[in-house]
Image: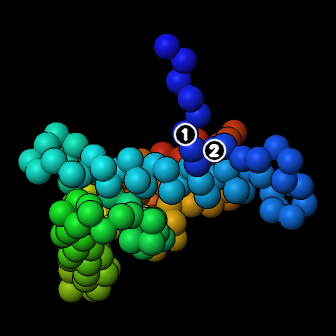
Amino acid sequence: MRKEKPPAFKRDPFTPLISRGCDICEFGEQAEKLYLSYLIEGFCEENNEFRQGYRSSDGLCLYHFRQAFTIIDPKFNDALRFLVDATIQKTITLGCDLTSFIDKHAWEHCYERMSDSENTSWVRAMRFFGRNEENTFLEVNDCGKLGRNFPDKEEKCIDQ
Protein backbone atom coordinates (compact mmCIF):
# COMPACT_ATOMS: atom_id res chain seq x y z
CA MET A 1 0.00 0.00 0.00
CA ARG A 2 1.45 3.36 -1.04
CA LYS A 3 1.49 6.16 1.50
CA GLU A 4 0.49 9.61 0.35
CA LYS A 5 2.40 12.69 1.34
CA PRO A 6 0.87 14.58 4.27
CA PRO A 7 -1.43 17.34 3.00
CA ALA A 8 0.83 19.97 4.51
CA PHE A 9 3.51 19.15 1.94
CA LYS A 10 1.36 19.19 -1.19
CA ARG A 11 1.68 22.32 -3.28
CA ASP A 12 0.33 23.48 -6.57
CA PRO A 13 3.13 23.01 -9.14
CA PHE A 14 1.81 25.92 -11.19
CA THR A 15 2.20 28.45 -8.38
CA PRO A 16 5.23 30.60 -9.12
CA LEU A 17 8.07 30.05 -6.65
CA ILE A 18 8.90 33.75 -6.43
CA SER A 19 5.53 34.74 -4.98
CA ARG A 20 5.89 32.43 -1.97
CA GLY A 21 9.51 32.84 -0.98
CA CYS A 22 11.91 30.05 -0.08
CA ASP A 23 10.46 26.56 -0.50
CA ILE A 24 12.73 25.13 2.19
CA CYS A 25 11.57 27.73 4.74
CA GLU A 26 7.96 27.05 3.79
CA PHE A 27 8.38 23.27 4.09
CA GLY A 28 10.12 23.77 7.44
CA GLU A 29 7.21 25.82 8.78
CA GLN A 30 4.72 23.26 7.49
CA ALA A 31 6.71 20.42 9.06
CA GLU A 32 6.76 22.25 12.43
CA LYS A 33 2.98 22.59 12.31
CA LEU A 34 2.54 18.97 11.29
CA TYR A 35 4.78 17.65 14.10
CA LEU A 36 3.10 19.91 16.66
CA SER A 37 -0.29 18.55 15.62
CA TYR A 38 1.02 14.96 15.95
CA LEU A 39 2.39 15.82 19.40
CA ILE A 40 -0.95 17.23 20.57
CA GLU A 41 -2.81 14.23 19.15
CA GLY A 42 -0.47 12.00 21.15
CA PHE A 43 -1.60 13.74 24.34
CA CYS A 44 -5.29 12.97 23.68
CA GLU A 45 -5.36 9.76 25.70
CA GLU A 46 -5.00 10.34 29.42
CA ASN A 47 -2.30 8.43 31.33
CA ASN A 48 -0.66 7.01 28.24
CA GLU A 49 3.03 6.27 27.73
CA PHE A 50 3.32 9.21 25.36
CA ARG A 51 2.40 11.67 28.11
CA GLN A 52 4.83 10.06 30.52
CA GLY A 53 7.60 10.21 27.93
CA TYR A 54 6.90 13.89 27.37
CA ARG A 55 7.01 14.58 31.13
CA SER A 56 10.48 13.03 31.32
CA SER A 57 11.77 15.06 28.35
CA ASP A 58 12.84 18.71 28.26
CA GLY A 59 9.53 19.54 26.56
CA LEU A 60 8.90 22.23 23.96
CA CYS A 61 10.76 25.49 23.72
CA LEU A 62 8.71 28.63 24.38
CA TYR A 63 8.39 29.41 20.66
CA HIS A 64 6.86 26.03 19.81
CA PHE A 65 4.75 26.03 22.97
CA ARG A 66 3.14 29.25 21.72
CA GLN A 67 2.86 27.86 18.18
CA ALA A 68 0.83 24.92 19.48
CA PHE A 69 -1.99 27.27 20.44
CA THR A 70 -2.16 28.89 17.02
CA ILE A 71 -2.58 25.68 15.01
CA ILE A 72 -4.48 23.27 17.23
CA ASP A 73 -8.21 22.69 16.98
CA PRO A 74 -10.13 23.58 20.18
CA LYS A 75 -11.48 20.01 20.31
CA PHE A 76 -8.09 19.04 21.78
CA ASN A 77 -8.63 21.07 24.96
CA ASP A 78 -7.61 18.20 27.28
CA ALA A 79 -4.38 17.68 25.35
CA LEU A 80 -3.62 21.41 25.46
CA ARG A 81 -4.36 21.47 29.20
CA PHE A 82 -1.83 18.66 29.66
CA LEU A 83 0.73 20.61 27.63
CA VAL A 84 0.17 23.73 29.74
CA ASP A 85 0.38 21.82 33.03
CA ALA A 86 3.55 19.98 31.98
CA THR A 87 5.17 23.23 30.81
CA ILE A 88 4.27 25.03 34.04
CA GLN A 89 5.84 22.21 36.06
CA LYS A 90 8.99 22.26 33.91
CA THR A 91 9.38 26.05 34.23
CA ILE A 92 8.91 25.87 38.02
CA THR A 93 11.62 23.21 38.23
CA LEU A 94 13.85 25.21 35.90
CA GLY A 95 13.34 28.35 38.01
CA CYS A 96 14.28 26.50 41.19
CA ASP A 97 17.39 25.03 39.55
CA LEU A 98 18.43 28.45 38.19
CA THR A 99 17.96 30.04 41.63
CA SER A 100 20.17 27.36 43.20
CA PHE A 101 22.72 27.77 40.40
CA ILE A 102 22.92 31.51 41.09
CA ASP A 103 22.95 31.07 44.88
CA LYS A 104 25.82 28.60 44.72
CA HIS A 105 27.94 31.21 42.97
CA ALA A 106 27.62 33.48 46.01
CA TRP A 107 30.58 33.50 48.40
CA GLU A 108 28.70 31.95 51.34
CA HIS A 109 27.65 28.94 49.21
CA CYS A 110 30.72 28.60 46.98
CA TYR A 111 31.78 25.32 48.63
CA GLU A 112 28.43 23.61 48.10
CA ARG A 113 28.44 21.09 45.29
CA MET A 114 25.96 21.67 42.46
CA SER A 115 23.62 18.95 41.33
CA ASP A 116 23.58 17.99 37.65
CA SER A 117 20.22 19.73 37.17
CA GLU A 118 21.53 22.93 38.80
CA ASN A 119 24.73 22.82 36.78
CA THR A 120 22.89 22.53 33.47
CA SER A 121 19.95 24.80 34.35
CA TRP A 122 21.35 27.78 32.45
CA VAL A 123 21.66 25.63 29.31
CA ARG A 124 18.08 24.41 29.66
CA ALA A 125 16.91 28.01 30.15
CA MET A 126 18.73 29.11 26.99
CA ARG A 127 17.16 26.26 25.04
CA PHE A 128 13.69 26.97 26.42
CA PHE A 129 13.75 30.69 25.70
CA GLY A 130 16.04 30.54 22.66
CA ARG A 131 14.12 28.05 20.52
CA ASN A 132 16.59 25.25 21.25
CA GLU A 133 19.04 26.57 18.67
CA GLU A 134 22.69 25.67 18.97
CA ASN A 135 25.47 28.21 18.78
CA THR A 136 28.08 27.06 16.26
CA PHE A 137 31.02 28.65 18.08
CA LEU A 138 30.24 27.59 21.62
CA GLU A 139 29.24 24.25 22.99
CA VAL A 140 28.38 22.80 26.35
CA ASN A 141 30.70 20.01 27.45
CA ASP A 142 29.68 17.04 29.58
CA CYS A 143 30.14 19.07 32.75
CA GLY A 144 27.64 21.73 31.71
CA LYS A 145 30.44 24.24 31.15
CA LEU A 146 30.56 26.53 28.14
CA GLY A 147 33.61 26.09 25.91
CA ARG A 148 34.91 26.90 22.46
CA ASN A 149 33.87 24.54 19.71
CA PHE A 150 37.24 23.51 18.27
CA PRO A 151 37.13 19.95 16.93
CA ASP A 152 40.86 19.36 17.35
CA LYS A 153 40.93 20.35 21.04
CA GLU A 154 39.47 18.16 23.75
CA GLU A 155 38.36 19.77 27.00
CA LYS A 156 38.58 17.82 30.22
CA CYS A 157 35.96 18.16 32.95
CA ILE A 158 37.38 19.33 36.25
CA ASP A 159 35.51 18.05 39.28
CA GLN A 160 34.11 20.90 41.35
Q: Nearer the viewer, residue 135 or 41?
A: 41
Q: Nearer the viewer, residue 11 or 39?
A: 11
**Horizontal and vertical percent for residue 128?**
42, 68
Q: Using the rendered image of the protein, determine whether residue 49 is visible from the camera's viewpoint.
A: yes
Tag of residue 18: none
Assign a secondary structure to mark 1. Answer: loop
Disc 1, disc 2: CB below 8 Å?
Answer: yes
Is residue 9 rendered to the left or right of residue 69?
A: right
**Horizontal and vertical percent for residue 126?**
46, 70
Which residue is drawn at the image coordinates 51% and 56% (left, top)?
Answer: 33
**Residue 160 in which image quadrant:** bottom left
On the image, numbered disc 2 is attached to which residue? 9
On the image, numbered disc 1 is attached to which residue? 6
- Which amino acid, mark 1? Pro
**Label 2 environment density (alpha carbons within 10 Å; few <14, some 14–19, many ≥20):** few
Is residue 121 rendered to the left or right of residue 5?
A: left
- Which amino acid, mark 2? Phe
Question: Looking at the image, which residue sits at the far top?
Answer: 1
**Horizontal and vertical percent for residue 76?**
26, 61
Count of numbered circles in the view: 2
Q: Using the rendered image of the protein, determine whether residue 87 is visible from the camera's viewpoint.
A: no
Which residue is drawn at the image coordinates 61% and 58% (left, top)?
Answer: 29
Is residue 58 rendered to the left or right of residue 3?
A: left
**Horizontal and vertical percent for residue 155?**
54, 47
Q: CA distance from mark 1 to mark 2?
A: 6 Å
Which residue is drawn at the image coordinates 66% and 43% (left, top)?
Answer: 10
**Label 1 environment density (alpha carbons within 10 Å; few <14, some 14–19, many ≥20):** few
As drawn, 10 above or below 135: above
Is residue 145 rendered to the left or right of residue 17?
A: left
- Colouring style: rainbow
As drawn, 135 above or below 47: below
Assign a secondary structure to mark 2. Answer: helix
